[in-house]
Amino acid sequence: MPPLPFTCEKRPASGSAGMVVTNAPLGAAAGSEMLAAGGNAVDAAVAALLTLTVVEPMMVGIAGGGIAHLCLPDGRHEIVDALSCAGRDMHPTMFEPDPDAAPNALDAKDRRNLVGPSAVAVPGNLRGWDLLHRRHGRLPFADLLEPALRAAARGFIVTPYLNGAIREHEADLAADPEIARLLLPGGRPVEPGTRLVMDDYAETLRLVQREGAAALHGGALGQALVDRLATGGEDAGAVTMADLVDYEARLRNAIRGTYRGHVVVGPPPPASSGVHVAQMLNLLEGYDLRAMGFGTAETMHLLAEVIRVGFEDRRAASGDPDFVDVPVARYVSKAYAAEARTRLRDVGGTGSATAGRESPDTTHVTVADRDGMIVSATHTLNGLFGARFMVPGTGIIPNNYMSNYDPRPGRALSVAPGKRVPTSMAPMIVLRDDRPVFALGLPGGVRIFPSALQAIVNLIDHGMSLQEAVEAPRLWTDGGPLELEPAYAPMRDALAARGHDVRLVPTVGGGMNAIAFEPDGTMKGAACWRADGTVIAQGGGLARPGVRFEL
């Protein structure tokens, strides 16, 4: 393979006793602590995610939503759908479309579906993590909260990444005294290097330790959330205590596709990834990408066209399968790929960017234990700091998932009671000969599943190492402008000559993290430069029986 047009900024880690990769150092440390204490990958993943609600408060929280993909040692796959949904009192005309927004945009007048109490959907994260643990966890649930509790009560060091997130939405955060008191002391964003203590959230975590998910879904935390939402006047949210009590995380069957001798497994609708990653790989299977080369104009044009076609079909049918008929079997079939290849163009073109609105601000964890259990999980508040306020006395930041619905009635994404939000989350696991070889995922809104696609192509077609695959430059389009990351800048003119409206952007998607599995039991973990991604690998293990003491 010729030299790659980029240099990796991070290094992988290897071990055989466990692997935890998250987008913050203390998140990875929390998961690793659970493995060291005798827990399994589920314990580690839940502990990591709970700790990320502290150290990545802009990305994830117990009042958010997400999807976890579990591969069990016996080869079974389970998808835990903890996505947020519309409450029972929510309805298609609860928002007025913004008259100044672009056609088909999901913006509501006065940003009511984006900021404040009316932006909050029924949360699912805590229920989802509870379901994962009840089905497969090994340690007591209370133990999984200890690392998060320490980080909240003792404090943690603010990174430039967190500081930058606060600055991005400083004006909205300043409008809420409760969240401003924590994140904008003295009217300024907490500086990198500052120790941030979350006393109220520490008490919330202690309550969750004692009561589990019921603390939010029916208990005092839920009441505090409902009471805060009711203070919004005409902007009051419609989430009720009954919504919180009745919410259930759902088990769903994974979607499987095949690609050059591999099986690629991902989540089903409401997630787009399982369906459309399989579809796009089927399209690409008709081309010799290895011969075409990584980062060439030919390869990049093909990827852009394949992603465009994937988004065309996503717009035609995607969302909650209880409300939208998604032709899964058709989209993932090889016959459909042969038909869809006729839609690939020799010359790029520009259209409208109409992929919908999903915030790129999310987090992801990839975890594996020595017994063969793997968890790839993506969870979020939706936007940076969710609805951008904090529930008094709790430290809880609610989601703003209502911004993912169409504020107009009569649309596929219109608000309806109980409807789950669509998502591009892509917690993926790749198999060969019935054995896991890669697990990966990332944040990034509608750029998630095309980025996961590119990582899989990097690994299978271009023979990249795991570290190279997660750090490689990415591109993205939904049929409108073609976005390129900085390392692809030298290809701008060549792609423009092929008809693409090229835009250089700082990143396409967020911090990917991944694990590779070798036949000898060795695991390699990698995290990329787009977030505070950290890998912690474990090796060694218990003493040989009878080394000093007869058993």
Image (spheres, grey):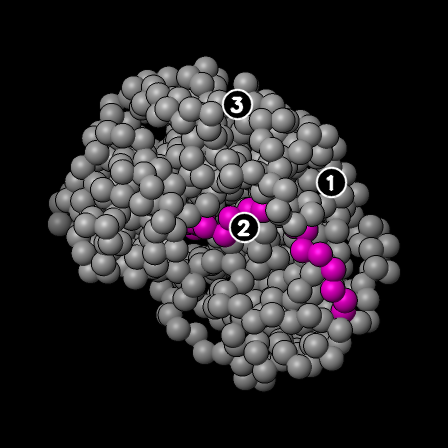
Q: Earlier in the sequence, mark 1 or mark 3?
A: 3
x, y percent for residue 300: 67, 72
Q: Which residue is mark 3?
A: 87
Q: Which residues are drawn in magenta?
A: 348-369
Q: For the residue labelled by badge 3, is the local secondary structure a helix, a strand or a loop?
A: loop
x, y percent for residue 79: 54, 37
Q: Residue sitting at 20 percent across and 30 percent down?
A: 203
- Is residue 182 toward the left or the right of residue 66 in the image? left
Find out whether residue 367 is within the magenta segment: yes
Q: Earlier in the sequence, mark 1 or mark 2?
A: 1
Asked if marks 1 and 2 touch (Cβ < 8 Å), the reply is no
Task: Give neighbour class at mark 2: few <14, some 14-19, many 20+ (Cα, 10 Å).
Answer: many
Q: Residue sitting at 69 percent across and 61 percent down?
A: 480
Q: For the residue labelled by badge 1, is the local secondary structure a helix, a strand or a loop?
A: loop
- Out of 535 and 345, give the one closest to the viewer: 345
Residue type for callout 3: Gly
Q: Residue sitting at 29 percent across and 48 percent down?
A: 55
Quadrant occupied by the C terminus: top left
Specify the quadrant of the image occupied by residue 161. bottom left
x, y percent for residue 210: 24, 23
- Is residue 370 toward the left or the right of residue 160 in the image? right
How far separated are the C-alphas under marks 3 and 2? 23 Å
Task: Give neighbour class at mark 3: few <14, some 14-19, many 20+ (Cα, 10 Å).
Answer: many
Residue closest to the far front:
99
Residue type for callout 1: Ala
Q: Residue sitting at 15 percent across and 44 percent down?
A: 154
Q: Which residue is mark 2?
A: 445
Q: Which residue is mark 1?
A: 317
